[in-house]
Image (tube, rainbow, N blue to C red):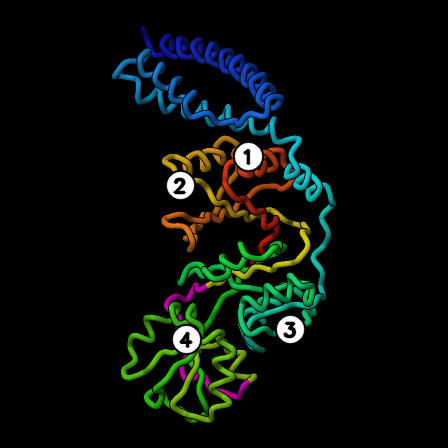
Amino acid sequence: MNLDELRQQIDDIDTQMCDLFARRMQVVTDIARYKKENNMLVYHPSRARSVLHNVSKRLGPEYEGYGRTLYHTIFDLSESYQTRVLSEDTDFFKKIKEVTSVPPQPFPKRASVACAGCEGSYAHLASERLLDLPEIMYMSNFGGVFKAVASGLCEFGILPIENSTAGSVNVVYDLLSEYNVNIVRSVRLKVDHALLAHPGTRLEDVREIYSHQQAINQCSEFLSTLKNVRIIPMENTAEAARMVAQSGDRTKASLSSRLCAELYHLNPIKTSVQNRDNNYTRFICISKNPQIYSGADRTSIMMVIPNRPGTLFRIMSRFNATGVNLVKLESRHIPEREFEYRFYFDIEASVYSEEFISLMCELHECGEQFKYFGTYAEII
């Protein structure tokens, strides 16, 4: 046979496979309805093992590995479809439909905002990127920002979530799980650290440098060149600058923004001391109430899943089955549980698409815990 004839055979086989797949999914629909009426779970590991065992026997050693891979994909698609059918009457499905049924509103230009630290912090700069007229209230730490938003003291809270050099801000991820807040916006801010000290101070005069641990990590290469200098972490880069200014001590310096130099009358001994010129930090804007603003196309969720082989793979397969793009996956250890983790997902998809709603409902049913943080736009 020539190549065209062989390809024609493949086309004929594919036609039969498509017809059989459609028939199989019709039966899957009937199974989903039966499970719904009888309050049964979608996933049955023993049934899956039985089918895979039969596949291996029928295909033999040459093709059984490929066949098992094919059937794992078929199981994922079947389970995805069954979950969609079963989820339509759940409270979570109704909540998602309610949130997405409200027409998107323009992001406000003026609002009360909670930030950690003091004037001159990078959260302060992020607030001014997001809002034309932010009424900023400064908190002593990130936990204070969450409390201010959760209590209704401030409409929004601005917090760093991830840096391109130093990675994720883990404490913020932990606080997201602890508090009932929603992410409604994010912004990517270029972070440029300067070494600030009193006017007249030389680099060789400095014996102590203060800053937030993230800034210290982002400037590790510069700091490693300094001799006999103590590096002291603080709650915030702007607080570090203010403390240095108030101390009157020329042996102290801070890693802070250039704005802090103006605010606290300090001199930049050295500028742009971060490891990378393309040093960016993502800030999230949190709110007490869920709200989808114009341009929202990014969603953040958290899941705790059972510590069993293949569980995370099954979660990841849901993204493939629905065609939704996963842009970030972060894991955080659960302190009270050995070798178990919370997983944080950032998803890129239209919140109004059926694929998005289907995925949210499926993931909600897959884990021990599930938390929807919100859908929002990211400003670059």
Measure the C-alpha gap from mark 3 to mark 1.
39 Å
Secondary structure at badge 1 equals helix
Measure the C-alpha gap from mark 4 to mark 2.
35 Å
For disc 3, the marked residue is: 137
Measure the C-alpha gap from mark 4 to mark 3.
23 Å
- Residue with the most extreme left position: 61
* Residue 195 belongs to the span the image colors magenta: no
The answer to whether mark 4 and mark 3 are in CB contact below 8 A is no
For badge 3, the amino acid type reads Met
Q: Residues within 10 Å of mark 2 (few under 14, many from 20)?
A: few
Secondary structure at badge 3 equals strand
Measure the C-alpha gap from mark 4 to mark 1.
42 Å
Q: Position of residue 125 (x, y in %)?
A: 57, 70
Q: Which quadrant holds the N terminus?
A: top left
Depth check, mark 1 against mark 2: the one in front is 2
Q: Residues within 10 Å of mark 3 (few under 14, many from 20)?
A: some
Secondary structure at badge 2 equals loop
Secondary structure at badge 4 equals strand
For disc 1, the marked residue is: 362
Measure the C-alpha gap from mark 1 to mark 2.
18 Å
Question: Toward which corner of the image does residue 228 lie, by quadrant?
Answer: bottom left
Q: Earlier in the sequence, mark 1 or mark 2?
A: 2
For badge 1, the amino acid type reads Glu
For badge 4, the amino acid type reads Pro
Q: Position of residue 274 (x, y in %)?
A: 40, 70
